[in-house]
Amino acid sequence: MADFYGLRLRLVSASGSEDLYDALEVGARAVSTECVVFLAASLLPRSAGWFNKLLSAYDAHKKSVLSPTLAYEDDSIRWAGTWVAGAQSDRALISRYAGYPIDAVAGMGTTEVATATFECCVLPREALFSVNGFTRGYLGTHEKGLDLGLKLKQSGLKSYWLPSAQMLGSDDISVSDKASTIALIERIDRQVFDARWANILTGDRSPSRGETA
């Protein structure tokens, strides 16, 4: 596959990698480029040209983390930016537009968000290590990604969402996982995340307003 696409490939053997994000961090440590692109194996481009769109937008927003829209195969939105919730919400962060048809974000420009999604993003390589990478202690990947996004935000790195670049994929859940186990993992990770971040984010919890560039 690497020969077919003309890619330079490096295989890395690592111990202690427990999930997708651990593997992405191992990959980032194995290269020396100024920026890195994270891409989960579960994602596929919705149309051609997504990679150049992502890199062009990143060039226009240097020193940032930038992600495309993630959609399901039925063209409903899975991820289109993470936002600081209003005071009426029981969560500090929410996923805006989740479940909407993907046409709902058509024509929108590059938008600053609270955190990017690390399933697919481009970011400065050194920024990842300046905050000691992903935080261990989460059972799943959702809050683990939010946690890194907020660490990068605290360090001064902005996050952006590029609506016009779109990827297709499913949730990062094994078909062998039981619904009760998934629910338990989500509940525990939510408690761990809120314990780490709820007080820090309290001052930011005002009605969400996306800023479009």
Image (cartoon, rainbow, N blue to C red):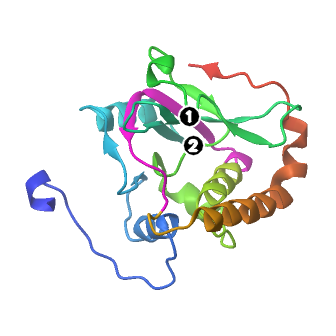
Where residue 8 appears, x then y in whole percent?
A: 20, 61
Q: Secondary structure at mark 1?
A: strand
Locate the C terminus by quadrant: top right
Residue at 43% in and 48% down = 170
Where residue 203 appears, x then y in whole percent?
A: 90, 38
Q: Is 9 in the magenta?
A: no
Would residue 165 be seen by someone viewing this image from the given angle? yes
Residue at 64% in and 50% down = 149
- Which is nearer the eye, 201 or 31? 201
Q: Which residues are magenta?
A: 153-173
- Around disc 2, counting alpha carbons within 10 Å, would you say few (fewer than 14), some (14 to 19), or many (20 or more)? many
Quarter residue 167 falls in:
top left
Which of pointers 1 and 2 lies earlier in the amino acid sequence?
Answer: 2
Mark 1: amino acid: Tyr
Residue at 38% in and 57% down = 33
- Proximity of marks 1 and 2: CB atoms separated by less than 8 Å: yes
- Which is nearer the eye, 45 or 113? 45
- Residue 41 lies, with reference to residue 74, above or below; the image says below
Where residue 109 appears, x then y in whole percent?
A: 50, 19
**Gap in Å between the C-alphas at discs 1 and 2?**
6 Å
Give the number of the disc on residue 134.
Answer: none
Residue at 23% in and 32% down = 48
- Which is nearer the eye, 184 or 3? 184
* Left/right of residue 152 with respect to residue 174 in the rendered view: right
Q: Is 154 in the magenta?
A: yes
* Left/right of residue 88 with respect to residue 136 in the rendered view: right
* Left/right of residue 177 with respect to residue 31 in the rendered view: right
State the residue position of label 2.
Answer: 116
Would residue 132 be seen by someone viewing this image from the given angle? no
- Around disc 1, counting alpha carbons within 10 Å, would you say few (fewer than 14), some (14 to 19), or many (20 or more)? many
Q: Secondary structure at mark 2?
A: loop
